[in-house]
Image: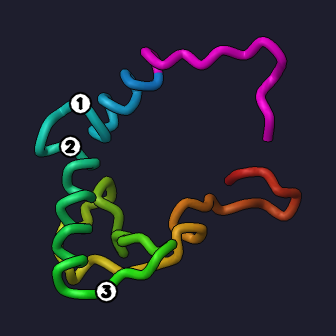
Amino acid sequence: MPSSPGYVRDYAQEYAGQKARGESGTGSRSGNAKRKRLRRMVLKRRKIREGEEVDHIRPLVKGGKNTPGNARVVPASKNRSFPRTKTGGMR
């Protein structure tokens, strides 16, 4: 969906939010670093095709572990989509 006319993203605020959630800016213990480590582990063991991503079965933020046993390979479109209501809005 396109942005409103004249809309300007506030990158500083977005980064502050990511940092508060542990997604970036906190070094090797950040959620992003953990996800990248898991992807490397899975790549060594399995072949991932174009358009597929490694997904945590139980998310890290909900107490999931960063192990191959908690990983699955799913299409990128499924991994990046959000649950929607019947009218198309996000839940």
Q: Mark 2 falls on what kind of element?
A: loop
Q: Which residue is mark 1?
A: 25
Residue 70 image position (x, y, % from top left): 26, 77
Magenta stretch prevailing secondary structure: loop
Pointer 3 or 1: first along the chain? 1
Is residue 8 inside the magenta stretch? yes
Q: CA distance from mark 3 to mark 1?
A: 30 Å
Q: Earlier in the sequence, mark 2 or mark 1?
A: 1
Q: Which residues are magenta?
A: 1-13
Please tell me which residue is depicted at 30% across the width and 77% down the height of the picture: 71
The amino acid on which the numbered mark 3 sits, given as a three-letter code, is Lys
- Which residue carries the number 2 mark? 30
Residue 65 in view: no
Q: Secondary structure at mark 1?
A: loop
Q: Is residue 70 above or below residue 79?
A: below
Calculate the distance from the C-alpha at mark 2 to the C-alpha at mark 1.
Answer: 7 Å
Return the residue found at the far right.
Answer: 87
Q: Which residue is mark 3?
A: 47
Q: Is residue 67 magenta?
A: no
Q: Position of residue 65 (x, y in %)?
A: 19, 68
